Amino acid sequence: MCFRGWLRALRLRTLPLSICAVATGGLDALGRDVIRNPVFLGVVVVAIMLQALSNLANDYGDFVKGVDSEGRVGPPRALQKGLLTPSALKKGIVALSVACLGTGIILLLYTFHDAPGLVAVFTMLGILAIGAAVFYTLGRRPFGYRALGEVVAFLFFGPVAVCGTYFLLRREVLLANFLHAVGIGFWVASVLLANNIRDISHDATHGKCTLAVALGLAQSQRLLSVLLALGAAGFVVEGAWPLTLTAFFSVIPLIVFIWLIPPVRYDIVLRLVVLLIILNTVVKALLLE
């Protein structure tokens, strides 16, 4: 039961988001050779750990605040189903936070052994990333309860993950890479917004002011459509038309689809956006030498 509880709390199906974000930066920097680069492999490990940490903290935070009640629409959580105790999950959050920080510092010392200033800067960025993962639903004023979740997701899955990975590998950031980061950031923010649209009624009832609750259903659906389109636009600068076509021809029917189904079925939408991000990353890898 305990093992099943940890698997549910980790939400493994969300891990491709962090992997694709850093893979976009890595592919921009080194092409297919990135898979043999030890620094990139270290970045992937840290990204997965941060995503897992965010999932654990989200499970714990929503439960202790009373949001994960029996009336919740989405997939059941580990604490909600009694598969883990709050104490065990809290210890897991602390342990994974320490592991994230330690692994990140080791990676930075290896990468920037000749530039201690960069080690300090990226260490601070890593601490901010850990804070963002933990305080989405934890703390007295979690930003996920103040309609800021999508903004933080955009920043850390977009510019921070994509451009940060590129900089670790090349010690520079190009405009094209930044635009790809913006595209991925918008798409990951779309996943979170679709999730919050699904939960809009339940969250509003339980005092969780997500962006969807703040905007209302119709405006949230419009924003979701815009974020998906802007995400695709970030790959127009790729210079490889198959990737651009993949982005736009995947997004257009998805935008139509989100207006055809009720919010309670938006699990389908967020899964399709995750598949879109994976497909975009795979096509990008195939196009590179």
Image (cartoon, rainbow, N blue to C red):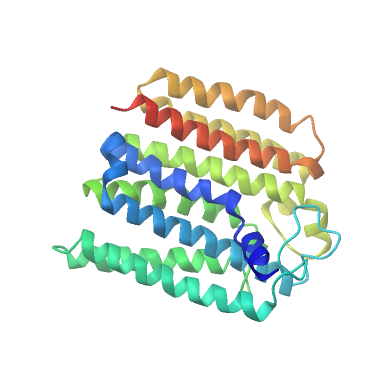
In the rendered structure, the answer to whether residue 257 lies left or right of residue 236 reads right
Q: Residue 222, located in which quarter of the rendered image?
A: top right
Residue 148: percent from left, percent from top: 60, 57
Which quadrant of the rendered structure holds the N terminus? bottom right
Visible residue check, residue 252: yes
Name the residue furthest left.
114
* Of residues 240 and 103, the one drawn nearer to the viewer in this rendering: 103
Q: Is residue 57 above or below residue 171?
A: below
Name the residue furthest right.
71
The residue under the point 42% across, 25% down is 236
In the rendered structure, the answer to whether residue 111 lies left or right of residue 206 reads left
Residue 281: percent from left, percent from top: 45, 35
The residue under the point 28% across, 27% down is 289
Q: Is residue 192 above or below residue 139?
A: above
Name the residue furthest bottom.
87
* Of residues 23 and 236, the one drawn nearer to the viewer in this rendering: 23
The residue under the point 39% across, 43% down is 23
